[in-house]
Amino acid sequence: MEKDHFSAASSVYEEHNKKVILKKDKEQSVKRYHPWIFSGAIRKITGNPVEGDIVEVFSAQEEFLALGHFQIGSIAVRIFSFHQVKPDLDFWHKKIETAFRLRLLIGLADNSQTTVYRLVNGEGDNMPGLVIDYYNGIAVMQTHSVGMYRMRHQLGHILKKLYGNKLTAVYDKSEATIPVKAGLEVKNEFLWGNLSRVTVTENNFNFFVDVAEGQKTGFFIDQRDNRKLLSNYCNGKNVLNVFCYTGGFSVYAALNHANLVDSVDSSVTAIEMTNENIRLNELSAGIHRSFCMDAFAFLRDIKNKYDVIVLDPPAFAKHQRALSNALQAYKRINQLALEQLRPGGILFTFSCSQVVSRENFRKSVFAAAANAQRNVEILHQLTQPPDHPVSIYHPEGEYLKGLVLFVE
Ligand code: SAH
């Protein structure tokens, strides 16, 4: 059945009958390799493509521009090639192999100290709509487009070939990422194997990950380098990790000689996993405490208790229209932390909202600092690690922003 989908997709291309023709002068962004075609730029669609079909994109002068997955919505085509290629299994195999070789190059794909990394980062790896995370043998796929979803079995097959015996399971976790209006009734499922819990190693620290029950694909892999940076600031300090999820920053702090580490998250499951991860790393009792509660409520009364605070909230804005409320929320939470840090303290503060620009985030923190009436210096400006690459043609792919602040 799925194989049919794939060959159907290939033959669609061979027949050259599903075309998207752009309005006059709307080809500039494609010529500059931007991977999205917005519906407003389209003059004509021929061949009646349905969601997920492969379409060819042409300029108003009928010049071939690109090949991509068609979708109903504001982003009408997600481009995966700017060449007139045949998008068969071999084509996708080469793409995934290129992504894998990049992870080898940056020292992640063959590293016993780190067994968890992102293998495919959507547009950043020239595969819009596809995310694949690797968890010490388990590959978790998250598709954001119907086109990629329809290819999930082929992609699973490619992963098996790529990793061989190292691969214990392939889990498709697209239920929350495929638009509901596509009407596919997507369910998360194992495409192969059935193992959902695994222990991964990151910079030599161990973490339990449950890819099925966990948030996103199971773990916030994108904070790896920033967690490592925190290690430098923990010796003898009281550290507070707010929005701790499964305790990533907490484990790094505790194993780097913090005096005390407190972790806060509103999710019971997250706090349970944090406690498990503290035990897994054999941390001495008494150094760590967990609090299952709302971050804003917790931060109301922590005056002078902490030398280091980490704020890594979920995306406060998922859409442009939520932007101004989100900026207010970033300001509020940062102000609470900045007002109460001990003198000479350090704040690690993040935003993972794609619609919040680096500039806007910095302005929110600036307003928070001014309201808190503290002297604040920026020590580090942080972003996502290299296994979450950003295509130079798609700056929207840079979503993670962080600041490390010295608070006098
Ligand atoms: N820093 C973490 C990732 C944080 S993800 C890591 O390195 O793994 C964001 C977390 O914030 C989630 O675990 C979510 O449960 C939690 N969260 C969301 N809203 C919250 C709130 N109002 N108070 C406390 N925690 C919250």
Image: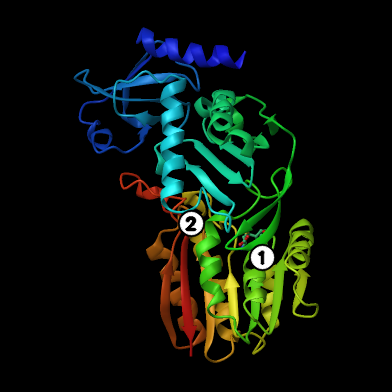
Is the CB–ligand 1 distance for label 1 below 8 Å?
yes
Above or below, comparing residue 1 to residue 137 in the picture: above
| Residue at 41% from the left image edge and 30% from the top image edge | 94
Q: Can the viewer see residue 336? A: no
In the displayed structure, does residue 239 sit left or right of residue 388? right
Q: Residue furthest top?
A: 15
**Residue type, label 2:** Leu
Q: Mark 1 sits on what residue?
A: 244
- Compute the Cα span from label 1 to label 2: 23 Å
Give the image location of residue 403, x and y in percent.
Answer: 46, 71
Above or below, comparing residue 50 to residue 32 in the picture: above
Residue 161 lies in quadrant: top right
Give the image location of residue 295, x and y in percent.
Answer: 68, 69
Above or below, comparing residue 281 to residue 222 in the picture: below
Q: Disc 1 on helix, strand or loop? A: loop
Label disc, if present, on residue 255 of the rendered structure: none
Q: Nearer the viewer, residue 349 or 159?
A: 159
Tell me if mark 2 has few (under 14), some (14-19) or many (20+) residues whose alpha carbon lies within 10 angstroms of its own. Answer: some
| Residue at 22% from the left image edge and 35% from the top image edge | 28
Q: Mark 2 sits on what residue?
A: 323
**Residue type, label 1:** Cys
